[in-house]
Amino acid sequence: MNYLELHKQYKEESISGRYITLQHIESLILKQKAEIIGQSVLGKPIYKLQFGTGKNKILMWSQMHGNESTTTKALFDFINFLDSNTTESNSFLDNFTFCLLPMLNPDGAKLYTRENANGIDLNRDAQNLSQPESVVLRKEFEAFKPNYCYNLHDQRTIYGAGESGHSATVSFLAPAYNENRDLNEVRIKAMNIIVSMNNTLQQFIPNQVGRFDDSFNINCVGDTFQYLNVPTILFEAGHFANDYEREISRKYIFIALVSGIKFLNENDIVLNEIGNYLKISQNKVVFYDFVYKNVKINYDNNKKIINFAAQFKEVLNNEKVTFEAVIAQIDNLENYFGHIEIDARDETYYDGESNFPILDKKANFYLGKSIQIVNGNIK
């Protein structure tokens, strides 16, 4: 299967970028046999789409966190594939039933926030079920009785796959089901699927697949569903090169979805892939968006050479997400990388007001007379 060509063919071109709201996807949802299964805090519909008639049932939900939209885009690419009437897609539909909740948190999506309209992180509400969105997901879980759950998210640009300087473009987790992080048949099934997806992704993004920390938190939805004996997989769409709109990451999430289900379609999960799962590099916080090296500053009439870093803040302006770079760290960068690294070569820092970088200040400054930095990057 040519996964790159497959995504090119089935990519849903009508949605792109980071700001994806219910308004952007509702027409796509209503093209299908959609069902409203609940409402958000602010009364927005929460839709369910169902495909296939197979005995193996997979529940997927996206945008539980409103500002994590990459997997939503990939989900509609996957829906286009399911609708393609090809031998492979028809095999999926014959052997699986897919229950898809494309946007669990429409209020958070509109506000571009992680939380819902009440300021609650839905991924910490699995036990209290204090929010209508949390109740909708749990009721669907109980009614659908899935064989597998896919919990679809984005992760920040700060993560690397290990400490080798490779960005974590896609990360996975087979959540723990208890405090001891023990292994059982349910969790091992999730690990085996992750290993199969990793094997495919390594062909395209070698050393850029991460494994998320598996500390147990029963308030998290994935941990709860694993505890309830349903193999659950956390997907995290991360950063690739200069892909801040997450269109490249979107492609690799699509490839992971298709390749993992292909593996399930063609194999009984009888092998124990724990060893290969643990070989996937663990996510580490080792990146800033920008690192500036060998910068000369004048501080209290003393000249010294420093390194410092800047990080983008995502800001919603007029229904568009903009990226505003601010100074995030000064020195102590020995174990960090920059997605963009700029060597000042002992040029002097000046920002029009001060002779040295200040934390949380916008990253607009000069390095000597020849280099101007605007919004973190060389102008």
Image: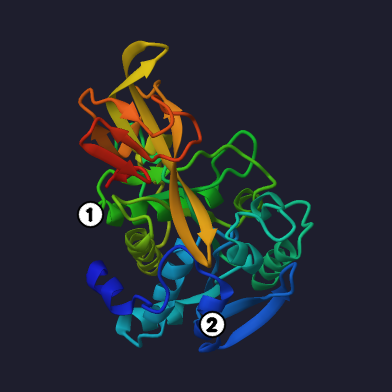
Q: Mark 2 points at which residue?
A: 29
Tell me which residue sits at (55%, 45%) in the image. 184
Can residue 282 be seen from the camera position used here? no
Quarter residue 148 falls in: bottom right
Residue 115, disc: none
Q: Is residue 115 left or right of residue 255?
A: right
Callout 2 amino acid: Ile
Of residue 112 and residue 35, the one placed in the foreground of this image is 112
Query: In the visual, does 323 lie left or right of 222?
Result: left
Inter-mark Cα distance, 2 to 1: 32 Å
- Please say if 169 is above or below 245: above
Query: Residue extending furthest front?
Result: 352
Kindly state the secondary structure of the residue where label 1 is placed.
loop
**In the rendered image, which quarter contains the N terminus?**
bottom left
The image position of residue 207, as x and y in percent, is 28, 43
Helix, strand or loop at mark 2: helix
Residue 244 x/y as whole percent: 37, 55
Contact between marks 2 and 1 (CB within 8 A): the answer is no
* Horizontal and vertical percent position of residue 81: 37, 79
Tell me: residue 357, above or below residue 58.
above
Which sits in the foreground, 143 or 348? 348
Residue at the spot 36% in from the left edge and 35% down from the top edge: 162
Q: Name the residue under label 1.
A: 203
Looking at the picture, tell me which residue is in the foreground, 259 or 5: 5
Quadrant position of residue 34: bottom right
Amino acid type of the residue tagged 1 in the rendering: Gln
Residue 35 vertical placement versus 253 (above, below): below
Which residue is found at the position 54% from the left and 55% from the top?
Answer: 232
**In this rendering, the label closer to the viewer, 2 or 1:** 2
Crowd rating for badge 2 (residues with CA inside 10 Å; few <14, some 14–19, many 20+): some
Place of residue 41 in the rendered image (x, y in percent of width and height, measured from the top left): 75, 67
On the image, which quarter does residue 8 sit in?
bottom left
